Image (spheres, rainbow, N blue to C red):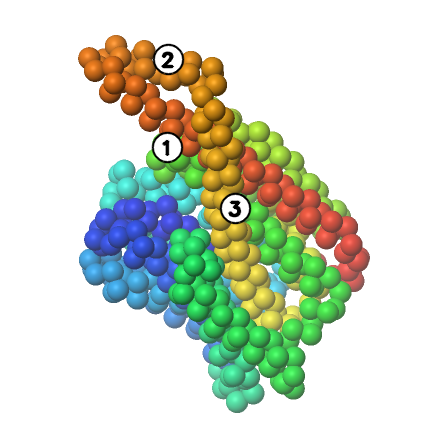
Amino acid sequence: MGTLGARVTSFGLADLRGALHAGFDEGAWITTSFGIGQMVVGVASPYLGAVFGARRVLLLGIILFFTTSLIGPLTDDLPAFLAMQFLSGLGSGTFIPLTIIFVVRSLPVRMVIFGLAIYAMNSELSQNVAASLEGWYADTLSWHWITWQYCVALPVMFAAIWHGVPREKVNTGLLRQLDWWGLAYAMGGFAMLYAALDQGNRLDWRGSGVVVGLATGGGILTLAFLVRELTTPRPFLNLRMLLRGNLAILMLLLAGFRFMILSTAYIIPAYLQTVQNFRELQVGQVLLWIALPQLVIALPLAMLLRRIDGRWVLGFGSALIGTACLMASQVTSQWATADFLPSQVLQALGQSFALTSLVVLLVRSIVPAEALTIGCLLQISRLFGGEVGTAFMQSFVRIREQVHANLIGLHVADGTGAVADRLAAYAARLGAHAADQALAAAQAERLLATAVTTQASVLAYADGFAVAALGAFACLGLVAVMRRGAPAPF
């Protein structure tokens, strides 16, 4: 649910804007406010869990998420809904960092690797079932269920945590030792950078004072955070541990895989909606083929990682992702659901291998006492990696589409025989239904312009898949320089 929130909302933005009487620009802040809430609390929640106990923080997060999800759709006021989205982000942002801490510290040693495998599955599964869920809500129920869906699942989660997560004593002594300034710098800086990335493509990056202000302010606060954590004797986030073993490479790989996952998760829906005019439910039929293999492969992968060096599994997964992206880069304007399935099933397998082994290698690189820092770093890498991937791919596809449209337009402007033949064929078909030949000729020119735009979009999406493939092979290069880790108890 922590990962699903922003994704379902992204697919349902048109429905939400209509219900809230919001324009395109105002409605764009709906997903941003949710992500900011997750970023703010994601940095702090591991330490809240250390002070008050993971069980208490998770239960309070569920109550907050449930309450805001329930009452959010009952308002038709955009500022009130944005506030509910931010608070929902605060509640759900506690889930992912505290779950990894619970898995490492509380599960029996023989069960840890299975817990990590299921933990790694959450990102893949939730990213790719979102389109089907939103489409089904819109067609069958109502837009309210974009947030009300959590009110069905959260009570089950509440009961599981109430009975399954052990009670811990409150340790208020940690509050006196906490580096409050470092925490404040991190929360403010990361939240501002996240907002700048999320709004940058829409507001034209350097052409927007809002984006420049957010990026500058966030950069200054983040720099202050880094200086603080590297100089204070008791940092709240021990960045020095990144210099040990493979941790720095593993964090880069996590951000890189999130970049690729969100990139391809953006390209396929954008292609199907722009070129084929698919609705969300039809888009979801493609994305489900990425999600479903996770349910089958997660636990066998955990058993495999008990016997094989995780670097080999990680490298194999990276190679599969790169190959799948190269296959998808052959996309044409005729592709529909079935044409994406071979590459997406291969990518699903690759992402399962890569993410599961990556999480296992990360946890094997630390001792349980460092779980707080890992919880923070995982949330930061997960959110920033995904946001950078989405922002980069949106801007890259937009620019490449403009380039291809200009290049194709040069051939159209030349007025060659092929262009004249195409216009004549259009005019002949339209003329059979229109008495005015001048009107038929004008409509033929509009059809040709539409064909140029469509082809430019297809070529831009193909370039996007090619860039994602390069990213996968770059990750494979990082895997190649990793050193063998120390023996782990699981």
Helix, strand or loop for disc 2: helix
Helix, strand or loop for disc 1: loop
C-alpha span from label 3 to label 2: 34 Å
Q: Which residue is mark 2?
A: 425
Tell me the crowding category of disc 3: few under 14, some 14 to 19, or many 20 or more residues within 10 angstroms, Cα based: some
Q: Can residue 107 be seen by looking at this rendering? A: yes
Tell me the crowding category of disc 1: few under 14, some 14 to 19, or many 20 or more residues within 10 angstroms, Cα based: some
Question: Reading the chain from its start, which is encountered first: label 1 or label 3?
Answer: 1
**Number of residue marks:** 3
Q: At which x and y percent is residue 71?
A: 24, 61
Residue at 39% from the left image edge and 36% from the top image edge: 273
Q: Amino acid at mark 1?
A: Phe
Choose top left, top right, bottom left or bottom right for residue 154: bottom left
Question: Reading the chain from its start, which is encountered first: label 2 or label 1?
Answer: 1
Q: Which residue is mark 1?
A: 278
Q: Amino acid at mark 2?
A: Ala
Q: Quadrant of the C terminus?
A: bottom right
Helix, strand or loop for disc 3: helix
Tell me the crowding category of disc 2: few under 14, some 14 to 19, or many 20 or more residues within 10 angstroms, Cα based: few
Q: Nearer the viewer, residue 416 or 450?
A: 416
Q: Nearer the viewer, residue 233 or 447?
A: 447
Q: Amino acid at mark 3?
A: Phe
Q: Can residue 156 be seen by looking at this rendering? A: no
Query: In the figure, 456 relative to 220: above or below?
Result: above
Task: Indicate left or right for 22 with 199 as reference.
Answer: left
Task: Indicate left or right for 450 with 311 as reference.
Answer: left
C-alpha span from label 1 to label 3: 22 Å
**Closer to viewer: mark 1 or mark 3:** 3
Q: At which x and y percent is residue 15?
A: 27, 46
Query: In the figure, 471 relative to 151: above or below?
Result: above
Q: Which mark is residue 396?
A: 3
